[in-house]
Image (tube, rainbow, N blue to C red):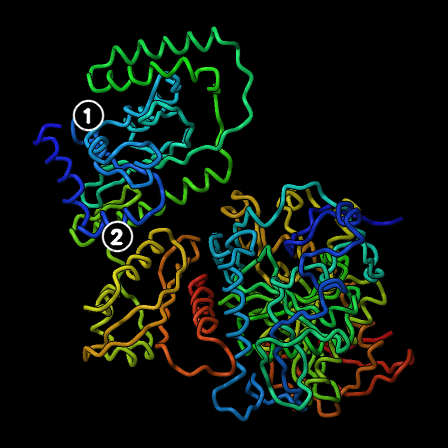
Amino acid sequence: MMLRIKRVPTVVSNYQKDEGEDAARRGGGCGRNCLQKCCIPGAKLPLYTFKRAEEIPGDKCVLEHDDNQAPVAFLDSLLLGQWEDRMQRGLFRYDVTACETKVIPGRCGFMAQLNEGRHLKKRPTEFRVDKVLQPFDGNKFNFTKVGQEEVLFQFDASEDGEVQFFPDAPVDADSSPSVVAINVSPIEYGHVLLIPRILECLPQRIDRESFLLALYMAIEAGNPYFRLGYNSLGAFATINHLHFQAYYLAVPFPIEKAPTRKVTTLGDGVKISELFDYPVRGLVFEGGNTLQDLSNAVSDACIFLQDNNIPHNVLIADCGKRIFLLPQCYAEKQALGEVSSELLDTQVNPAVWEISGHMVLKRKKDYEEASEENAWRLLAEVSLSEERFEEVKALIFEACSYTLSEKEDEHLTQGAGDDKPPLEGTGSINKGRNCNMVSGTQECLVLQ
Amino acid sequence: MEPPQLGLIEQSFNSRYSNWAREALDELPDNFTITDPCISGHPIVFASRGFLKMSGYSRDQVVGRNGRMFQGPNTCRRSVMEIREAIREERGVEISLLNYRKDGTPFWMLFRMTPVFGKDEGRVIHFVAVQVPILRRRQRRRNGEGLCGEILSNSCRREVCSSSSVELAGVSAADSDCRVTALEIEEKCEASDTEKQLAATAIRNVLSVLTHYSESTGRLVCEKRVDPHLPDIPIVYASDAFLRMTGYARNEVLGQNCRFLTGVDTDPSALHQIKQSIQAQQACSVRILHYRKDKSSFWNLLHISPVRNATGKIAYFVGVQIEEGSVDRHGLSPEMRQLSVVGSIKVAVRISSP
């Protein structure tokens, strides 16, 4: 049985049309200055190249640079300046700063925004929510169809190990550029889309290289209020073309403030914790001896989830220092009719931002009545049950061949809200399915 | 025209707008008139060169007279009524209207009128009307010569009943030609989008000149009725770089309006552009001559933008100053850097922890 839900997809580009319409327009040059073969030759866009780092630089969330003018802040300025430029050029469907917003009183600090213009009053489209991996379909909207004016800059690793900015670089199709584009229906100021290797038309699925690119973006921006998010298919992504989202919001997200309980530290230094006292169950990844270690730990988990058809969302926060991984099941529940109509009426689709605590509401009534209680209740529906989460967590660890560290004790004093007794005994998880049992308290890994 | 009336008319214009206003208005290519509803008879106090050419009259024949002098037998009475109502309600109107030239030939034009308010008084002081000729279109279906004739004589009768003898003379002259041209008159003529746009542009041009040149007389005018008690947009934050650039101390700057930066050679039109943008709640970039505390001047590439807070309403205006000639860093142009400052401020003001 194919599971489907109906929703009106968000318009992220001024060139996004109904799929039927789009198919009819196929064939012939477009004259729209897009990113397809018709318009790419000769195209020029600004290019920002970052320096690959071997090490995560300890306390600093910036990379070392020779120039003492702090070029790390440069990406931040570039993003903000380019975004404001597009605002003044009228490329957005509405001024998001004209949308009322508030922090809901309570201990979590959920944020609500009243945005009546984001959601179109169109007929809803059907989305398959039972398959996290679906093949790319060139007939549907994808980001090569956006206008070049919606692209802010190309974003890639520098060839020679230096941070560089080229205001007017040719778009070289052969080098498979990645780009940052605006979201014309922004949730917040600075809402952009990071599209890794855009011309390769990758479907919405995580791979190690793309995730690392997203992580670099968070680091390069160097702004703790600039986060990146990812929604898998089935977890409310609507465009099956690999992309991450990002925007600025100058307050902490509730998920960032939630207490965590350490699960384990891997041999490569990556610390994995789980959220507690938060409506949605999820894992938090931090640390790592190198950036790649942290990145791969998360990507591998995502790859496992997508291969096993478990929808999930990812939040990259704290300038890339903390990454949240949240498996979810709301879409499936919706398709099976298991969600209360009260929640359905709010038409909130809990993607990464909502799960992180930022709700965009369409109806004034919902905005005015927004409370910590009903935000919590909605998100609780999104979460995997405790039982299921434990199961999934175990499977992730098993499949990712995470090697546990032998020096567990040293890490026990780090981390928020961590006052449990130390692990009794350590062990390593082998590759494959023959794993050792690791005993201990709730924070330990329990395997079949 | 009796001398006292003429004096009033001159004063109507001159007391509001500086001498340069007439010159500036004369430079505009548009057809327009400015009328004063406060003088008995609601006379024209200014007519543009374009208008005079279009209508075939000389300035003396037009200034001091009411606009109905250009109406004629086939001018739609309902349209005239709409204009009259708009005047009474002190609001704008846009309508296509049949007018007559001095030689009696009728022509269709898009008539767009807007009130001008005195800033201090908060009431209407002038009306600006622009006239965009509508190009001839295909004939609309007519009911026949008989009906035209009826309309003709009805409107003539109405004109005869009106008070002014001057108007009667005007109508009579037109009347003799009416029958000849009646067959060619359409009952209704719509303006195209282009013509509407021309009208809108023309209105903007005229209002721009009027608001600008009303400043030096101290008796400001503006497009909208404003609350004369609105505060003067004081500075609430000044960056260190701003203080360094201008040479002022923070306490000398906070609470003041930015105009303390202007001086003798600052171009009023730059100031005017700033004011207009602020009123229109839009961003703008100007190159303006500013003065430091030590009286030395510098060219300021100033970008001003409205900034909204959590309520979604405009709470501040941010002005980002870049001294012309300062060095670019890292390839970001001054304009891009200014925009990024605006962006940072927007992010910061947007929401805050309770």
Q: Which residue is mark 1?
A: B41
Which mark is on residue B270? none
Q: Is residue A261 visible?
A: no
Dots 1 and 2: beta carbons under 8 Å?
no
Indicate the position of residue A65 as horizontal and vertical percent values: 55, 90
Indicate the position of residue A216 as horizontal and vertical percent values: 65, 79
Residue A372 versus residue A21 in the image, above or below: below
Q: Sort mark 1 into few (<14), some (14-19) or many (20+) by Cα contacts within 10 Å.
A: some
Quarter occupied by residue A33: bottom right
Residue A157 versus residue A89 in the image, above or below: below
Q: Residue at x 72, y 55 (%)?
A: A30
Indicate the position of residue B114 as horizontal and vertical percent values: 33, 37
Indicate the position of residue B284 as horizontal and vertical percent values: 39, 61
The quarter of the picture where the C terminus of chain A appears is: bottom right
Q: Is residue A113 visible?
A: yes
Q: Which residue is mark 2?
A: B212
Q: Residue at x 21, y 28 (%)?
A: B65
Left or right, A106 with respect to A165, comes to: left
| Disc 1 secondary structure class | loop
Q: Residue at x 80, y 76 (%)?
A: A397
Q: Sort mark 2 into few (<14), some (14-19) or many (20+) by Cα contacts within 10 Å.
A: many
The chain containing the residue under callout 2 comes to: B
| Disc 2 secondary structure class | helix
At label 2, the amino acid type is His
Report, in whole angstroms, how far the alpha carbon at label 1 lies from the one at label 2: 27 Å
Q: Of residues B318 and A221, which is closer to you in this image?
A: B318
